[in-house]
Image: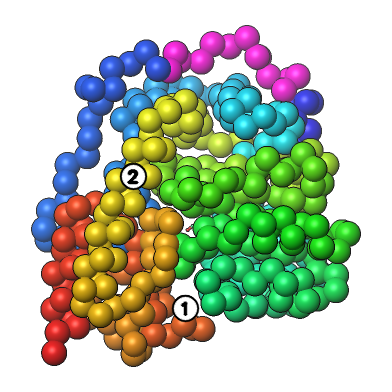
Amino acid sequence: MTDLTRRSLVGLGVALPLLGQFSWANAATPAPPSRSSPVRINYNESPWGPSPGAREAMRQGIELCGRYPYDAQYELIDVFAAQHGLEAGQVQVFCGSKLALQHAVVAFTGPRSLVLAEPSYEAAAEAAEARGVPVHNIALDARHAHDVDAMLAADHAPGLIYLCNPNNPTGTLTPRSDIERLLKHKPAGTVVLVDEAYIHFSDAQSCIGLVKEHPELLVLQTFSKLYGMAGARLGLAIGQAALLQRLEVYDGENVAAAPTLLAALASVRDRQLVPQRKADTAQLREQTIAWLGERGFRCTASQTNCFMIDLRGPAQPVVERLAKRGVLVGRVWPSWPNWVRVSVGDEQDMARFREAFAAVTAG
Ligand code: PLP
C-alpha cells in the first residue's frame, strides 16, 4: 500500500502524547552491570541504551499499543524528512535497517549480482548467497576505504553495489568524492546502497542529500547504534519514492511498534544526543586505541563505535581467551584472520577490556 493511500486511511487527527514535556532529569537510568556480568563489546551496541527522553517516550507509547501506530510512524517520517530537506515519500520505516538491506537485495539483485567490500557488514552478502545471487567481494584499499574503481570494474551490470560508510567492521570512512564518483560512473539500472548505520558517530556528511539527484541511490540509517535502540528495532530507508516502492517486495508498507516510534521521535528531536554520544564514544575509542598503540598493537582509523586491532597472529584464540575472562569481543572476518573487531562500551567496559587484553596478550 502506498504512503498516500495508507495515510488517507488513518485518523490523522488522533493526538499523540506530547513529547518533550517530560522531565528528562527524572528519567531512570539503568543500573550499572555487576562485575560478574560479561562485558558485551561484540555487537556494536550502545552501552547507554535509549536516551532518557526515548525511555520516557517508550513508556508513553504503551498507551498506543492497542492500535496500529500509523500516526506515530507518519509523524516520525515527517519530522525526519523536514530535518533532512526530503519529502515524506522519500523515507520508509523498517523494523531494523537489516530488514531494509535484505529487502534491497531481494528487490535489486538476481540474476544480477551484488558487489560489496571485504571486510564489510555481511548481511547483504548472506541474503544474496541464500538466493543464489553472484557476489563480488572487493578488498578495501590501503586506506581501508571502499575501492570504488575496483567495485565498478567487478561487473558491467550488477544489480546492487553495497557501500557501508563508515564501514563495519573497520569503522573507516570512504571519502565523499569516491562515493560521488561511484554514483557518476555506475551503470544505469544498478542501485547503489549506502549503509549509514554508523554515520552519526563520524564527521562524514550523510549521502541523504544526494538522493534528490540520484534516482538509484538508497541510503539506510538505524536507531540501533548511536541512538541506543538496537532492541527496539527501527531503521529508515531513504530514496526517491519510486525506488522505495520497489523495496516493498514482501509485504508492502509495514508499521513499527508504537513505543519504538515515539522513542525514535524523541531521539531525533533531541539536538544534544548525537553530539554528546559522538564525543563520548570518540573519547573512549581514542583512549583505548592509544593504550593499544603503546603496547604495539595498531588499530584501524575508526570514526565509529567499533575498531579493529591487528593482533599480528590468529585473532580467534584471543577472542576465546577474552571471553573466558568475561569480555566478549568480535567478530573475526575470514579475510582478515589476524584482526578482531572491538565495540566501544562505556568507561567501565573499556577498563575491563584493557585489563583482560593485557592479561591474554602478556608474555
Ligand atoms: N548495517 C550495518 C552496517 C550494521 O552494522 C548493522 C548492525 O550491526 C545493521 C545494518 C543492522 O542494524 P539494525 O539493528 O538497524 O537492523
Question: What residue do we see at 28% from left, 17% from top?
Answer: 23
Quarter that holds the C terminus? bottom left
Q: Residue at x 33, y 76 (%)?
A: 298
10 Å crowding of disc 2: few (<14), some (14-19), many (20+): few
Q: Rounded to the nearest whole Å, what is the CA distance between mark 1 and mark 2?
A: 28 Å
Vertical arrangement, residue 363 with respect to residue 218, above or below:
below
SS category of the residue bearing label 1:
loop
Q: Does dot 2 land on a helix, a strand or a loop?
A: helix
* Disc marking residue 279: 2
> In this view of the protein, which residue sits in the foreground, 277 or 14?
277
Q: Quadrant of the N terminus?
A: top right
Please give the label number shown on residue 349: none
State whether residue 200 appears in this view: yes
Most common secondary structure along the magenta stretch: loop
Residue 14: within the magenta?
yes
Amino acid at circle 1: Trp
Q: Amino acid at mark 2?
A: Ala
Residue 166 or 333: which is nearer the viewer?
166
Q: Tell me the quarter of the picture where residue 210 sits.
A: top right
Q: Earlier in the sequence, mark 1 or mark 2?
A: 2
Percent from the top left, x then y, of residue 91?
67, 36
Horizontally, is 189 left or right of 47 in the view? right
Task: Read off the magenta span.
Answer: 7-19
How would you rate the neighbour count of disc 1 (Cα within 10 Å): few for under 14, some for 14-19, many for 20 or more? Answer: some
Count of all numbered marks drawn on residues in the image:
2
Image coords of residue 274 (percent x, y): 41, 38
For the point 48% across and 31% down, the residue is 268
Membership of 132 in magenta stretch: no
Query: Which residue is denoted by mark 1 in the rendering?
Result: 333
**Residue at the (62%, 32%) spot, across then down:** 84
| The image quarter in which residue 39 lies | bottom left
